[in-house]
Amino acid sequence: MTDLLLAGIDPGWSKADPASLLEDWRERLSRLEPLDAEVAAATATHGEVIAGAGDPAALTLAHAAALGRERGALTRALGELPNLPLERRKTRGRALNEAKRLLSDLEAAKRLALERAAENRAGLDVTIPGRRPWVGRRHVLGQIFDELLDLFHGLGYSVYTSPEIEHDEYNFGKLNFPPDHPARDAHDTYFVSDQILLRTHTSPGWVRAMEERRPPLRLVFPGRVYRAEQVDASHMDQFHQIDGLYVDRDVSMADLKSTLNTFARSLYGGSVRTRLVPIYFPFVEPGAQMDVSCVICGGSGRLEREGRRRCSVCKGSGWLEVLGAGLVHPNVFRAVGYDPEQWTGFAFGMGIERIAMLRYGIPEIRLFLENDVRFLRQF
């Protein structure tokens, strides 16, 4: 098998150290050796030949000897896998695939080095197409934040920021959470001490703002929040929220509904349908969740382009939950020194990740924190 892995290499070919081209060459090669020593040794030899190629033609020959579709040594070795015992087939197959990725990265680095060397020898040629520099951009969550803040600024709201490390009294007590509410439990909340915790929502900002200011208030509260949840495709132990609060005289559910409809149509388009569904939250009464018609199936629950198959995003219901809202509970007003007979208000809160996932059809919440440029450059 060793002869097969080294087939095609001409003894007269020049060799060089691949580590000069790939910083992680030795590290990746060392990870390959315990998996399959023969493949690791052959990869090291092929790597030296690729690194030693003096011109593009020599590099093409070296690449073909290792990874060519018909004569490549590693390609032919993959074709021999069915002749090996099952366990040996698994380890060798994995090793060969790792080796192919490593040599492909090395070949790309060597080709780039040869191109740059040729440019330096020839001097500046203004007729050669340039290499466009990489340009960064706002993270997709930052873009959604900016769009929402711009929308609410246009509706007369100002931004209020509150601390991420909160007192239990602000995070729960003054927001009308009873002492035995499940959200206070350690499995839902990161407690720093008995009375200090990482905030579970941005709603404590309401309390701080109302304690500092007198009505009328029209504020939004953006920021990061933390919950001790099991991480999966739709849950993270940290994410971003934006809450809104409007306090004045004679504020009604009609004011709330019109504000949320403006938000939904700005974000999802003028044709989107909305509905308010009654739901319980300790800090609002009455409480509601706002749903929008599914942006994937258009609210039908079925995908016409796929033979009317049930839409997997909305589970066939035609609706997607976007946010929670309601009229501020009188107990919250009393906790901050407002007279609930004189003042009324509404509040709403939404997860920024959820807004982005629904808008762009993103299936996995963990993608937002992985910093994979292939994902980020799509937005």
Image (spheres, rainbow, N blue to C red):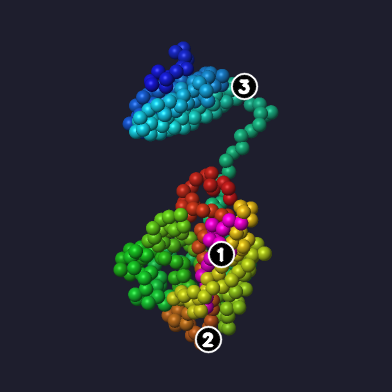
Front residue of 98/346: it is 98
Separation of disc 1 and disc 2 at Cα?
41 Å
For disc 2, the marked residue is 342
Question: To which quarter of the image does residue 151 belong?
Answer: bottom right
Pinpoint residue 348: horizontal percent, then vertical percent.
Answer: 53, 71
Look at the image and tell me whether residue 75 can be seen. Answer: yes
Q: Secondary structure at mark 1?
A: loop
For disc 1, the marked residue is 317
Q: Secondary structure at mark 2?
A: loop
Front residue of 94/309: it is 309
Amino acid type indicated by mark 2: Gln
Point out the tag, 1 or 2, that comes first from the N-terminus: 1
Point out the tag, 2 or 3, that comes first from the N-terminus: 3
Residue extending furthest toward the bottom: 341
Q: Where is the N terminus found, in terms of image quarters?
A: top left
Q: Nearer the viewer, mark 3 or mark 1?
A: 1
Pinpoint residue 131: horizontal percent, then vertical percent.
Answer: 61, 34
